[in-house]
Image (cartoon, rainbow, N blue to C red):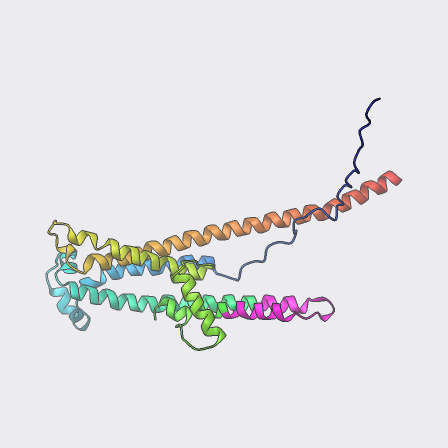
Amino acid sequence: MPIRKVKGPSKPAPSPAAQPTLDPSPPTPAPFFPFARYTSIVGVHTSLLVFTALFLPRSGFSDLSSPSIARSRPRRDGMTMLTEDPLRTIAWMCVGALILQVWWASWLREWALDAIASVERKDDHGQSEAPNGEKEDEAKKSERRLKHQEMNSQNATAPAYTLGVPSWKATTESLVRKLTWIRLFAELSPRSPIERALVYPTIGTFLGCWGGVIPIGLDWDRPWQAWPLTPAWGAFGGYVLGSLWAILVTNMKNLVDLGLIATREDERNQKESKPKTKKKAASKGAN
């Protein structure tokens, strides 16, 4: 007697609603940041730093009070002027770097405030377009406040002036500021162009300063090996390279983000156009 195979219950086909779909909405755009101005300002800043390290120390303090006497002196080799008095060279470098860093920090602070204002305008615009006057729940409000406080913490030198000095006060703003410092300079995890403009040059300065110690131990007997010239020049060079690396990473990331936004918008437009074409085809078939 033949054995009949018993078929189990067939599984129902998944409905289109049950199938996972990608969110067609484009990603949230980043806060406003002037990339063109940032690139030009970094170019000026790094050029002036190179001038401060290699050309400014060649002049003495007496040259500022009596330039005619300085012109009458016989010309000397530039390297000799840099190395004959390391203390004077370092003093000039510190004075020039302090002025340049305050100027650079003012730009970073201005861009941080512009980014905060752009985020607040987007939030206000989103609330005004909410249907039927819907209000945010408490969780979203607190999350939004923390986001604004974290961006406000980007408001010394460049990090202290831009981020704010950490304090031990028992406030949410102080806690966010401390956590921001830890995330940037302990975890080395920048998230925005302003943070990269702070962290990458700091890393470059640290590595350049330590790398500049190496020539001191070599037995070349060169005048430029005097302490602390090579660590100082290494720190300046590392800062310049870190600034240029921050520009490269920021611009590349901006191009990638723009490409992703354009791709998501194209996908959304294609999905919106498909129902229209189906309706047109159905109406033609009915006719």
Q: Quadrant of the C terminus?
A: top right
Q: Is residue 270 visible?
A: yes
| Residue 225 as seen in the image, left or right of residue 5 | left
| Residue 264 as seen in the image, left or right of residue 198 | right
Which range is magenta?
Answer: 121-149
Q: Position of residue 206 (x, y in %)?
A: 30, 58
Q: Position of residue 54 (x, y in %)?
A: 23, 58
Q: Position of residue 90 (x, y in %)?
A: 20, 64
Magenta span contains residue 139: yes
Above or below: residue 123 compared with residue 46 = below
| Residue 158 as seen in the image, left or right of residue 262 | left
Q: Is residue 41 visible?
A: no
Judging depth in this view, the residue of 226 and 60 nearest the camera is: 226
Magenta span contains residue 243: no
Judging depth in this view, the residue of 15 and 232 nearest the camera is: 15
For the point 44% across and 70% down, the residue is 177
Above or below: residue 180 compared with residue 21 = below
| Residue 164 as seen in the image, left or right of residue 114 | left
